[in-house]
Image: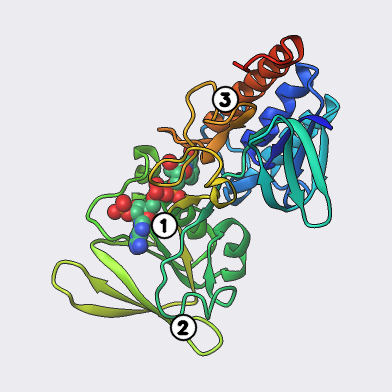
Amino acid sequence: MYDLIIVGGGPAGLSAAIHAARLGVQALTLEQYPVAGGQMVNSVEINNYPGVPNVNGVELAFRMREHAESLGAWFRTGTVKSFDLAGKVKRVQLEEEELEAKTVILAMGTEHRVLQIPGEAELNGHGVSYCAAGDGPFYQGSDVAVIGGGDSAVGDAIFLAQCCKKVYLVHRRDRLRAEKTLQKRLFRLPNVEVIWDHLPVSIEGENQTGALRIKNVKDGSERTLHLDCVFIAVGVRPLSSLVKDQVELTAESYVLAGEDCRTSVPGVFVAGDLRRRQLREILTACADGANAAVSAAEYLSFTEGQEGREAP
Ligand code: NAP
């Protein structure tokens, strides 16, 4: 039985692994893919992580993973099928094996939202992408569109403008949600055209995207943009379905916990984008990982010293 199982290999999970190792907690981190890295691997350029300006997401993930391993952290690749978190022994069911632990940190993060418009699913991987960092280089010299107005969409548009001929940023309002420094960089780029107040209606093409149909939300008029790829960056949703009946969630399905990352179930903690919080950055995910590991260590030392009494 492990002291702690950390579910998720993004910045929250990796930070929890680093802090657990430093605290002498025997922790196993489960990653869905080897050197997973979570959502940060989709960022080509990270500029808001202190001490490492202009770092690529894959590189930062790799460095965090190496850091954890250097402290003796254990990793394993595996997809969780179900959890049983209520009892003193926490059970984590993988495809072929059940793991047991005294504590669990939920750090599964989020997944990208979809638009649910005609053509999106059919052309996914053939001119529809949710990852500009990975797929952008295949569209050198092409015309492409990015959908969304947040940090991800604007960051993607800036990245794509380096290799694509023309980048349309299609946003449903007349103001961007993205942080101001990103906006300033975007507006300086000559090959980016922001199309305000428009929603995507359909993505068109036989076996490969050839056009995007968009609609003006103010007057209802429609037009077609001829292009080779549509990059969708319309936000994320929490990966909480496996724990929805076991820990308390918000109306938006984020796990409820305070700064100490304790969930409604003793011995179960949550860290990173899965937790309800104001600011979603790599930095805040790492802070959560540290807090969750410290809370788990406190819980372990209390329960070990106070067998039979109620846990804190
Ligand atoms: P986000 O901030 O939720 O932005 C989503 C964008 O998509 C919004 O502009 C939204 O429009 C638009 N949108 C949502 N549903 C849509 C639909 N059905 N059709 C068309 N447009 C739609 O998501 P995000 O940019 O992925 O960022 C997620 C979180 O990660 C945020 O907290 C963000 O700050 C953080 N993040 C941080 C960094 C960084 O630290 N540098 C980088 C990336 C992401 P409205 O504006 O009208 O709502």
Q: Amino acid at mark 2?
A: Gly
Which sits earlier in the primary sequence, circle 3 or circle 2?
2
Label 3 to label 1, Cα distance in Å?
25 Å
- Identify the residue at image location x=73%, y=44%: 92
Residue 10 in the image, given as x and y percentages of width and height: 65, 41
Q: Nearer the viewer, residue 299 or 208?
A: 299
Residue 290 in the image, given as x and y percentages of width and height: 63, 23
Residue 252 in the image, given as x and y percentages of width and height: 40, 47
Q: Nearer the viewer, residue 70 or 46?
A: 70
Q: Nearer the viewer, residue 214 or 193?
A: 214
- Residue behind mark 2: 210
- The image's mark for residue 36 is none
Q: Amino acid at mark 1?
A: Val
- Residue behind mark 3: 287
Label 3 to label 2, Cα distance in Å?
43 Å
Residue count near mark 1 (Cα–Cα under 10 Å), binned few <14, some 14–19, many ≥20:
some
- Residue behind mark 1: 234
- Identify the residue at image location x=59%, y=21%: 291
Any part of residue 230 in sight = yes
**Screen quadrant of the N terminus:** top right
Secondary-structure class at tag 3: helix
Quarter-wise, where is residue 292 in the image?
top right
Which sits earlier in the primary sequence, circle 1 or circle 2?
2
Which sits earlier in the primary sequence, circle 3 or circle 1?
1
Residue 168 in the image, given as x and y percentages of width and height: 38, 65
- Identify the residue at image location x=46%, y=80%: 119
Q: In this rendering, is residue 221 above or below 310?
A: below
Q: Nearer the viewer, mark 3 or mark 2?
A: 3
Seen from this angle, which residue lies furthest front?
Answer: 308
Q: Is 196 left or right of 234, judged from the image as shown?
A: left
Number of numbered tags placed on the structure image: 3
